[in-house]
Image (cartoon, rainbow, N blue to C red):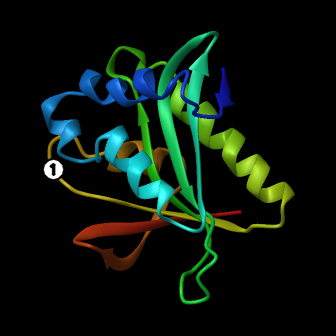
Amino acid sequence: MHLRRITADNVYRVCTLSDTLSADQRGMVADNGISLAEAHFADAAWYRAVYLGEEPIGFLLLDLGMDPDEPGVSLWRFMIAGPHQGRGYGRRVLETVVAHLRARGTTSLYTSYGQGPGSPEGFYRSLGFEPTGELVEDEIEAVLRW
């Protein structure tokens, strides 16, 4: 499993991964196409496709925290295609991202999530993310510190 740049050659396949999520999950995370469009207008966006061999199975979007009013690096969007969930791929991707951030001197990773059916709260908590007590656009903000 590895991260790969999103290019004209793979953007369509990455965008259609959103269609593999359950209806509840689709209510919790923005469509990959929308996320890519937003990333193109953000100064500090870093995004990649998650690949298993030659097959795209997920999408990752970080906000690298260039705004001095923001707390640091944020996991802006993250998804693993429905058929590939529950196999540890999401955990492995985020462990890889954390190792990369740690090597660059970063000490935390923020994210936010909604509550209810389809919520990724259990996944993030299993990785060690803890709620900060703050809300981000009506979502619970959580942080992973190392």
| Relative vertical location of residue 95 with respect to residue 38 in this rendering, above or below | above
Mark 1 crowd level (few <14, some 14–19, many ≥20, 10 Å Cα): few
- Residue at the disc numbered 1: 116
Q: Give the residue at the far top of this rendering.
A: 54
The reply, left or right, for residue 127 in relation to residue 102 is: left
Between residue 139 and residue 69, name the one nearer to us.
69
Work out whether 121 lies above or below 92: below
Q: Quadrant of the C terminus?
A: bottom right
User: Relative to 116, is 128 on the left or the right?
Assistant: right
For the residue labelled by badge 1, is the local secondary structure a helix, a strand or a loop?
Answer: loop
- Foreground residue, 24 or 125? 24
**Residue plotted at (62% across, 32% down):** 92
**In the foreground, 119 or 8:** 8
**Residue farthest front in this picture:** 8
- Residue 59: x and y in percent read 48, 36
Q: Please tell me which residue is depicted at 65% across the width and 67% down the height of the picture.
A: 108
Residue in view at x 52 percent, y 23 percent? 10
Indicate left or right for 43 with 19 as reference: right
Q: Amino acid at mark 1?
A: Gly
Considering only vertical position in the picture, is 24 above or below 133? above
- State the image coordinates of residue 16 (x, y, percent, origin top left): 33, 24
